[in-house]
Amino acid sequence: MNAMRQDLQAREANLNQSEKNMGMGAALNVGTTIADGDTMPFYRAYDKEAVKLSKSLNITEAGAKSLMKEEYKAHQGRDLYTDCKEVEKQYHLPKMEAEKQQQKATHAQSKTHSVQR
């Protein structure tokens, strides 16, 4: 197990530029995943992209996360975490709050119906 981890870490240290650029694409996908369709929180989107990137580059997930952060900072001049938390606040949290309110309304409505019977 340790030898495999060392091999993955050695691979991380020897990535070429096009492989490093894949880190930028994955970093951008984090924000897209948070905002589009079935939104998800930052931590899930970040993990999802790290897993995909680590498998495609044959590196560790921790290495993939570091690569995404570094490439995002190099290309955008901003922090991936900070930017994605803003996207989460703008897109994911309102959707979750709306779902929570819907559940409360449904729950209250079902209580009303059960009391009336």
Image (cartoon, helix red, strand yellow):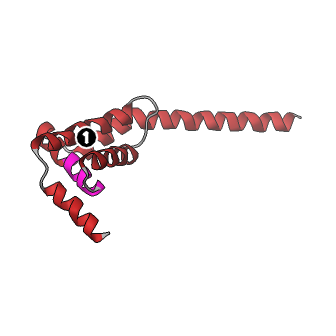
Question: Which corner quadrant holds the N terminus?
Answer: bottom left
Q: Which residues are magenta?
A: 61-69
The residue where tag 1 is placed is: 27
| Numbered circles on residues, count | 1
Q: Is residue 42 left or right of residue 79?
A: right
> Does residue 66 belong to the magenta stretch?
yes
Question: Which one is in front, 98 or 14?
Answer: 14
Q: Residue furthest bottom?
A: 2
Kind of element beneath mark 1: helix
Q: Is residue 96 left or right of residue 63?
A: right
Residue 78 visible in image:
no
Question: Which one is in front, 48 or 15?
Answer: 15
Question: Which one is in front, 22 or 73?
Answer: 22
Residue visible at 42% across and 36% down in the picture: 92
> Does residue 94 belong to the magenta stretch?
no
Residue visible at 34% across and 49% down in the picture: 51
Residue visible at 23% across and 55% down in the picture: 63
Question: Mark 1 Cα within 10 Å, few/some/many (few <14, many 20+)?
Answer: many
Question: Would you identify the image quadrant in which residue 77 lies?
Answer: top left
Question: Which corner quadrant holds the C terminus?
Answer: top right
Q: Provide residue 6's location: percent of width, then percent of height.
A: 22, 66
Residue visible at 23% across and 36% down in the picture: 25
